[in-house]
Structure formats: structure tokens, C-alpha cells
Amino acid sequence: MLEGFWYIATDSGNVHVGQPCAAVLCNQPLVLFRDRHGQVHALDDRCPHKGVPLSSGWQEGDSLRCPFHGWRFISSGECVEVPSIGNAPHPSPVSACVRTFPAEERDGWVWVYIGNSQCPKPTSPPPSLPVPADGSPMVSVRESAEAKVRWDFAVDSLMDPAHVPFVHNNYFRQREAAREKEKVFTRLPLGFRTISQNVLLPDTFIFRALSPRLGLATTTVDFVLPGIHSERWEIGKRFASVMLVATPLTDDRSRFDICVGWNFLHGLPVGWLVRRTLRTILSQDREVLESQEQGFGLKGSMLLNLESDNLAVWYRQLKKYHGDMLAGVHDPQHPIPEKTRLKWVT
């Protein structure tokens, strides 16, 4: 697990006024609730009195009440009522306070910041779906899927180009149309990027929706910690983008969250088809990753010696680099070359 990052806790539509919502991120149980002004708050899902999850209680105004002894907590985490002591002074504010977490909504998701003593507060807003430079309006849809797989395996799948024609055959690539690709990667502060110009799009129904005549496109693909893959395609004035996020829930369970947006086909009822396609793609990833988890078990190692595996190696090096920075290691070295070229067939 990586601390010091925003993570997707749930879909915004799952958090309603008056209905606390339970979530788990990085092994941390959370309770989310929306106040009367519509703002979402995130607290540790545990009453400090006797440990009952606050998500099993109820919301009163802009506060949560524990169902066991009625202790009531406001969005700052402060305990403002202990019924059993009446008007007597409350317990120590420190011991009776519930930990809170920064929470923001973006792209239809509730993002929660998981920090620690070295990085208690976020220095930037949550990530967002790439949008057109001309500001043209976009339509977007989202889907999510949980998988019984450790987080590193989930993140690996976000940047693994070699699995696409096999796991997602006919969606993004056609297996029989594989060809050699050469990509130039450049360094990002906590990730890497590749930009390709005048790319001939694969002949699949997904890319024909973007460009019926499969015109030449400019594509930009980013990967950044903690586990976010974003991609955008530009063909003339047509623009489409995707943000795929691997979210750590527990040590052995992860979730994929995907958002796709486009600035064309306005007014056509294609959202249902896009959602169905996204569900299928996520199901394909879940199935193969759960198989990987079963085959890998708790022992064994991976053979990451191909050029297409460099991205997975970089991810692991980036995790160590981030940890070194948080730990105050003197002059940690960024693991990604400023510019490098990789080749593979896909």
C-alpha cells in the first residue's frame, strides 16, 4: 500500500444525505456521509469508545451517531455528545476523536486521501479524466469491478501492453493483426508518458466508433502512482479519453475503476453500450488476474525480462522512490530515464 495519495472510495451516487456509507481503502475502514450542503466527509469507521463501526449507526444532521452507546461525532471527527454522562464534561478530545480523511468528488467518484505523518494533507487535487484542449463538452460513463487479487498484480495490468491482444482480443487489438511497436517514454514526476503521432488505429469496433474511417490519431498514454493509467486519442476535433484506476482495498482484494469520455456523438444513446463494453473488459481482466493469483499463490517470482515488462519494473522502482522521498532519504534518484525507447509486438 502507498500512502500520500488520493484513492477512489466509491461512486458518488452511493453516498446519500442521511445514509452513511461504508468503504475500505488500503486496509483502512471508512465511513462516508454527505452533509446537508451536499459535501462528502470521510472518517475512520470505528467508534473510539468500544470499536463499533460508525457506518452501522445513523446520520443526524451533519453528524454520525454510534448505535452502541449513542456517541455522536461531527465531520471534524470531534465527539460532541455522550448520552451516558449527560451534561458532564466529555472524554478527552484526543482519545474521543475519530480520525478524518480529506474527501473530494471528481468525475463522479468520491476520492479520499490516505496520508501519514510525513504527508498528512494533499498538496494537489485528485486526478481527473483528460479533457479536450479546446474545452468542448464531453459525455462520460463509469464502471467498477472488484477482484480477489493483490494490488501489485492489478496495477501491472494497467500498463501491460502484451496482454491486450489475448485478454481483450477484438476490443483494442486483433490478435492476428499484431505488429511490432516502438514507443518513446519520458519521465513524469511519479510516472512515465508516451506520445505517438500519426498512429493508424486498430480495426476494432471501439476505434471505429472514435473514427469510422480509422484515421491517423495522436495518442498520449500516462501512468502515475499510485496506480492510474490515463489515455487520450485525438483525431482532428474528435477527442476521447480513458482513466483506469487500480485501487487497493485490502491485502488480497483490489478494485478497478474506469471512466471513459468523448466529445462527439452528442445526443445519441450510446452510454448503455459503452457501459456494457466496459463491464466486459473489466470482467476479462478480473478473470485472468484471479487466475494469476491462484497460480502464483504466496510463493514464487515473476520473470520480468522482456522490454514490455519494463513498465512493471518501473512501477516497482517508482514505489521505492516514493517511499525513499517520504522517509527523507538523501537525494533519491528517479528510476525512470528522462527518455528511452522500448519495442514489443502487440
Image: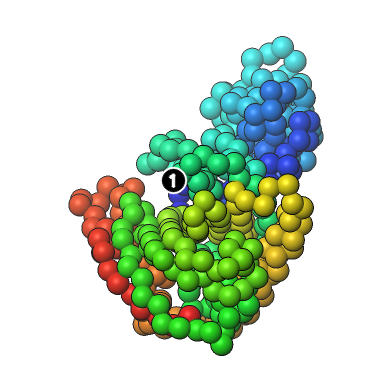
- Considering the numbered disc 1 on the image, is that residue within a helix, a strand or a loop? loop
- Tell which residue pokes out farthest to the left in this image: 331
Q: Nearer the viewer, residue 196 or 32?
A: 196
* Horizontal and vertical percent position of residue 21: 73, 41
* Horizontal and vertical percent position of residue 216: 47, 66
Q: Nearer the viewer, residue 158 or 183?
A: 183
| In the image: residue 254, left or right of residue 121 | right
Q: Nearer the viewer, residue 217 or 63?
A: 217
The residue under the point 44% across, 68% down is 199
The residue under the point 20% across, 51% down is 330
Task: Note whether 267 is above or below 306 in the view shown.
Answer: above
The residue under the point 33% across, 51% down is 189
* Horizontal and vertical percent position of residue 263: 59, 48
Q: Is residue 149 visible?
A: no
For the residue carrying disc 1, how many other residues have a C-alpha within 10 Å: few (<14), some (14-19), or many (20+)?
Answer: many
Task: Note whether 118 is above or below 162 in the view shown.
Answer: above
Q: Is residue 220 visible?
A: yes
* Horizontal and vertical percent position of residue 271: 73, 54
- Tell which residue pokes out farthest to the bottom in this image: 176
| In the image: residue 303, left or right of residue 262 | left
How many marks are shown on the rendered structure? 1
Residue type, label 1: Gly
The residue under the point 54% across, 74% down is 202
Q: Can you tell which quarter of the image residue 222 is in? A: bottom left
- Report the residue marked by disc 1: 4
